[in-house]
Amino acid sequence: MGIFDKLFGKKEEKSGGYSEVFNRLCDDDVTLIKNKDLIILTPSLAAFFVMSLLRDDDIRKLGDERLKKTQQFNLLVFYSFCYFYCVRSSAKMKRGHEPAITEMLRAAFLQGVVALYNAKVKNPPSSKVLNERGRVLYADFEAAADKYGFREGEGLSAQLEVSDAFASAVFADDRPNVIRGMLLYVYFVNISYHLIDEFLKWFLVEEEDFDEARRAACLAEIRAAQMVSRRRGGF
């Protein structure tokens, strides 16, 4: 059973509740959702759930190296980016609205990163400063990921290039980045390997496609499922 099955229960029991959302989608999208039994989420709900997976990640060090406060934020941004990039690459999106939804998803992830970082450290910089720094880091990470990719069997040279780009963004210093970078690269690959099948079950719509009642109900369901799972030692 996948992590989203744990969250939402049997998806076929939920399909009847999507009728209002279906009115905002084209026929091809509705057919795809029904045939593939996809879970419909807005970017903010998707990010809210994913950020819960990062709540216990230790950002104080990478490997045996202890990190400065700024580097801790950069590392948390990187961890969130790994999920974002996998969602961006795997989830289906409302036809004709992919760029807008991707931007909403990016913004929602960064908002979640800032909130989580504020909960993890004392006396953080302002949320505005953190969000702006996060956007710059996301741009660096995306540029590296889009250029070199993460395809299975990717050559060692490409792996080292993207690893170095990741490490340079996270650590922002002139020290050699090979070992640090490979730790980051492996983290990304593991996220992609273990969760791509889960993200393939997603169908993302725009925020406005969920009314307040549906958004609130879904948010409450996510929170309740998270509380149950935490008691059981899950996500």
Image (cartoon, rainbow, N blue to C red):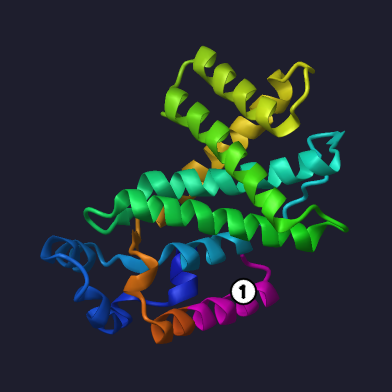
Instruction: Mark yes or no: residue 152 visible.
Output: no
**Chief secondary structure of the magenta portion:** helix
**Is residue 158 toward the left or the right of residue 134 in the image?**
left
Q: Residues within 10 Å of mark 1 (few under 14, many from 20)?
A: some
The residue located at (65%, 26%) in the rendering is 182
Residue furthest top as drawn? 157
Name the residue beneath numbered marker 1.
229
| Residue 91 screen position, x and y as percent | 35, 53
Q: Secondary structure at mark 1?
A: helix
Magenta span contains residue 226: yes
Residue furthest left as drawn? 27
Q: Nearer the viewer, residue 233 or 225?
A: 225
Instruction: Mark yes or no: residue 36 visible.
Output: yes
Magenta region: 219-235
Q: Nearer the viewer, residue 177 or 114?
A: 114
Magenta span contains residue 116: no
**Is residue 140 toward the left or the right of residue 155 in the image?**
right
Which quarter of the figure has residue 11? bottom left
Amino acid type, residue under disc 1 in the picture: Ser
- Quadrant where the C terminus is found in the figure: bottom right
| Residue 53 screen position, x and y as percent | 62, 59
| Residue 5 screen position, x and y as percent | 43, 70
- Rendered position, 135 above or below 18: above
**Is residue 107 toward the left or the right of residue 208 in the image?**
right
Q: Nearer the viewer, residue 71 or 139?
A: 139
| Residue 4 screen position, x and y as percent | 46, 66
- Rendered position, 199 above or below 119: above
The residue located at (77%, 63%) in the rendering is 119
The residue located at (53%, 76%) in the rendering is 222
The residue located at (68%, 54%) in the rendering is 128
- Quadrant where the N terminus is found in the figure: bottom left
**Is residue 182 toward the left or the right of residue 118 in the image?**
left
